[in-house]
Image: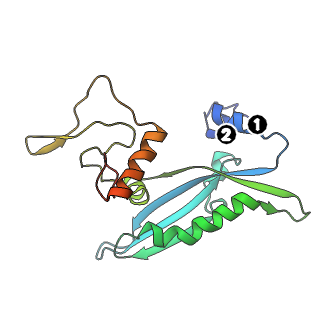
Amino acid sequence: MTDKDQTNDIGFNKCYQELLQRNVNQNFITFLLHLDGVGLCKSTKLKMWLFSGSIIGLQPKLRYRRYNMPLFSIWIGYKEPHPEVWLRNCIGMMRVIKKEGTQTFNNQRVDIKFLSITGDCPALKLILNFIGHGDYFCCWYCYLRGVHVNNKRQYLYENPIILRGASAYKEGCSEAERTKHNVFGHLG
């Protein structure tokens, strides 16, 4: 696979290329995970939530075809699913596959790598146990606090912007779980 068309696809970017170089003698398949909820009909609030994946090693035009996107889990209901209930078995299975890999027809081990997860704001809010996009501290990347101006929530630019790092994000999440209170958008 080459980037002759300069698509700047994930497979050609620096992080993925470094992953390939670090694992040059290893057989593996990389997945990008997707989470989304869609309404099934207008007359009711029946929704379908999907947890699926796409194989990064495939060319983009093949990667996003339905038959190349395995469905890991589905939830259909009138209310949002509880992520712990909905995804517990699926995530457990994925951990086993990630740890043990899988075997090909000629008994070669192939490791599975899950690189990241994407989704729309409601889906990510749900699985991250984070506040909605109209609340205070709703940005996943910074600590900008919303303010009320003329009965509307606004997010005024502040210089410098204080970004959340991965460790700060994890600490906020842990504190919210421990205290059962909202900590910079993390719900307890």
The residue positioned 71% from the left and 38% from the top of the image is 19
Instruction: Please state if 53 lies on the left or on the right of 102 as rendered.
Output: left
**Residue 66 location, x and y as percent?**
61, 62
Q: Name the quarter where the N terminus is drawn.
A: top right
Query: What amino acid is labelled 1 in the image?
Result: Arg
**Residue 171 location, x and y as percent?**
42, 45
Is label 1 or label 2 in front? Answer: 1
| Figure check: 122 above or below 168 | below
Nearer-N-terminus badge (1/2) = 2
**Residue 149 location, x and y as percent?**
11, 39
Disc 1 on helix, strand or loop? helix
- Can you identify the residue that label 1 sits on? 22
Nearer-the-camera pick, 177 or 163: 177
The answer to whether residue 67 is seen in the rendering is no
Residue neighbourhood size for the residue with mark 1, other residues' Cα within 10 Å, grouped as few (<14), some (14–19), many (≥20): few
The Cα–Cα distance between marks 1 and 2, rounded to whole angstroms, is 15 Å
Instruction: Please state if 150 lies on the left or on the right of 32 as rendered.
Output: left
**Residue 48 location, x and y as percent?**
43, 70
Q: Name the quarter where the C terminus is drawn.
A: bottom left
- Can you identify the residue that label 2 sits on? 11
The residue positioned 38% from the left and 58% from the top of the image is 177
Residue farthest toward the right in the current orientation of the protein: 106
